Image: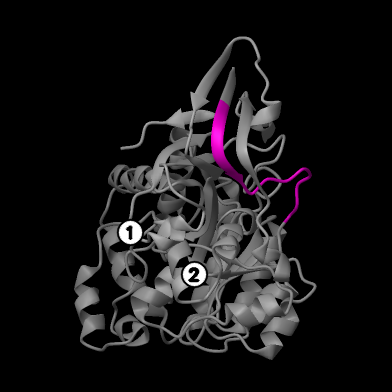
């Protein structure tokens, strides 16, 4: 099946040969073609170019998008969108001045979600998550990483991961599954954290691996959560089962999580509110993608990650939504781009790179997603008629996505 998208106002994020990421000053460069066409065959990008070279193949489905911009669908490399219920009561606690750590210490936060999840059936959990999947597709997301982590025991962690697997099998979006058994410390282990880490290593990881439920493993390495020693033990155990690390790091303080992630070749280190010269130096020359979550910092009113310092040092940078019920209840990646521009002073070109190609790398998918490149999967956004690429983050609450294509098929948006 051939699909020809023609009269594209601007075809964004084009490349002749695939790159794994863009870094430093290159983050501000966004290769594009004005007045373009794009040919899709069997779910893949077959060819593209300017309209003066547009082919006229036989038996082709033509899509005329005059006045519209076409770009890669967003890749959201950090979410927790499989969860039960919501946590709007804690929203009030935050407004009244309680910190994230204070809410967690009294059994709120992640532990609250854990209790709700344990009371929710697998089918109900799937139905709740399915609504969120359709929502983010409508926002232009074509690939998403989903973490477990609200189970906090073997049975419920497996329940979450089975739901993620079911979503992989029943929805058109590309899904990466990450095991996050070490998301928080259950109340019954608060006086013996090592025992819980042992349980993650000796019971949870083998059970997850036996059912092949995870692509990666994650640890919340931060103040009040898991130590560097805990993190390294869990990462080593995961490696024995072929699970590469993706680390929650330095959201609440300088935790050593970035250095631990680099040491164990983590695919990404995420959050990164607390980053200094030592952390930047550790990331230089590594294969680890620094990933910032603007939605969480916005929602929690936290200090902002020094993204400009990281890019000035030559590092790549990804942005993700952190979609979860407690600290970032939104999976709108267009809004994440806007936050990148408004709060972090990133340019529109930089935030597009950070939410497409670089975030695809942070999911292990940059060889097949994240750019307009021959042979890559046709996961695309077709905008409504807009004046420019810059208008996407500028009009920060406007719904500007007209159509989404996933695996070469146009999706009916709900």
Q: Nearer the viewer, residue 223 or 136?
A: 136
Q: Residue at x 57, y 22 (%)?
A: 3
In the drawing, does residue 313 fall left or right of residue 113? Answer: right
**SS at circle 1:** loop
Q: Quadrant of the C terminus?
A: top left
Q: Which residues are magenta?
A: 5-20
Q: Residue at x 62, y 35 (%)?
A: 36
How far across and how far down the image is residue 291, in percent?
A: 58, 68
How far across and how far down the image is residue 51, in percent?
A: 64, 30
**Cα distance between the residues tagged 1 and 2:** 14 Å
Instruction: Identify whether 23 is placed above or below 31.
Output: below
Please name the colour scheme applied to the rendered image: one colour
Give the quadrant of residue 109.
bottom left
Circle 2 residues within 10 Å: few <14, some 14–19, many ≥20 = many
Dot 1 corresponds to which residue? 397
Mark 1 / mark 2, whichever is N-terminal: 2
| Tally of numbered discs | 2
Q: Quadrant of the N terminus?
A: top right
Report if residue 265 is visible in the image: no
In the drawing, does residue 156 fall left or right of residue 358? Answer: left
Q: Is residue 343 magenta?
A: no
How far across and how far down the image is residue 153, in percent?
A: 42, 63
How far across and how far down the image is residue 316, in percent?
A: 68, 68
**SS at circle 2:** helix
Question: Which residue extends farthest front?
Answer: 52
In the drawing, does residue 374 fall left or right of residue 228? Answer: right
Dot 2 corresponds to which residue? 340
Instruction: Identify whether 35 is placed above or below 106.
Output: above
């Amino acid at each position: 099946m051939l699909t020809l998208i023609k009269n594209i106002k601007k075809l964004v994020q084009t490349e002749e040969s695939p790159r794994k990421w863009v870094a430093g000053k290159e983050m501000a460069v966004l290769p594009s073609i004005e007045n373009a066409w794009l040919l899709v065959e069997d779910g893949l990008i077959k060819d593209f170019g300017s309209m003066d070279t547009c082919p006229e193949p036989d038996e082709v489905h033509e899509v005329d998008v005059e006045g519209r911009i076409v770009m890669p669908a967003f890749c959201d490399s950090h979410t927790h969108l499989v969860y039960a219920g919501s946590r709007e009561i804690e929203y009030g606690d935050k407004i009244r001045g309680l910190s994230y750590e204070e809410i967690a210490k009294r059994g709120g936060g992640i532990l609250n979600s854990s209790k709700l999840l344990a009371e929710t059936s697998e089918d109900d959990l799937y139905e709740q998550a399915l609504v969120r999947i359709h929502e983010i597709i409508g926002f232009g997301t074509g690939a998403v990483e989903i973490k477990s982590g609200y189970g906090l025991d073997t049975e419920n962690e497996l329940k979450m991961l089975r739901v993620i697997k079911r979503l992989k099998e029943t929805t058109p979006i590309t899904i990466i599954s990450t095991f996050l058994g070490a998301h928080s410390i259950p109340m019954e282990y608060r006086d013996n954290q090592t025992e819980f880490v042992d349980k993650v290593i000796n019971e949870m990881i083998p059970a997850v691996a036996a059912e092949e439920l995870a692509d990666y493993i994650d640890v919340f390495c931060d103040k009040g959560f898991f130590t560097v020693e805990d993190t390294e033990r869990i990462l080593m155990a995961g490696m024995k089962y072929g699970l590469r690390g993706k680390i929650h790091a330095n959201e609440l303080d300088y935790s050593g999580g970035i250095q631990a992630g680099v040491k164990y070749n983590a695919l990404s280190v995420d959050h990164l509110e607390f980053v200094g010269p030592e952390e930047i130096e550790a990331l230089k020359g590594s294969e680890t993608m620094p990933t910032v979550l603007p939605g969480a910092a916005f929602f929690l009113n936290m200090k902002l990650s020094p993204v400009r310092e990281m890019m000035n040092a030559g590092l790549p940078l990804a942005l993700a939504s952190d979609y979860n019920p407690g600290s970032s209840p939104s999976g709108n990646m267009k809004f994440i781009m806007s936050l990148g521009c408004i709060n972090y002073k990133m340019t529109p070109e930089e935030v597009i790179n950070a939410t497409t190609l670089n975030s695809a790398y942070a999911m292990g998918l940059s060889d097949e997603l994240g750019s307009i490149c021959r042979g890559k999967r046709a996961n695309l956004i077709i905008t409504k008629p807009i004046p420019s690429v810059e208008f996407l983050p500028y009009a920060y609450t406007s719904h500007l996505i007209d159509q989404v294509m996933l695996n070469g098929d146009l999706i009916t948006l709900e």
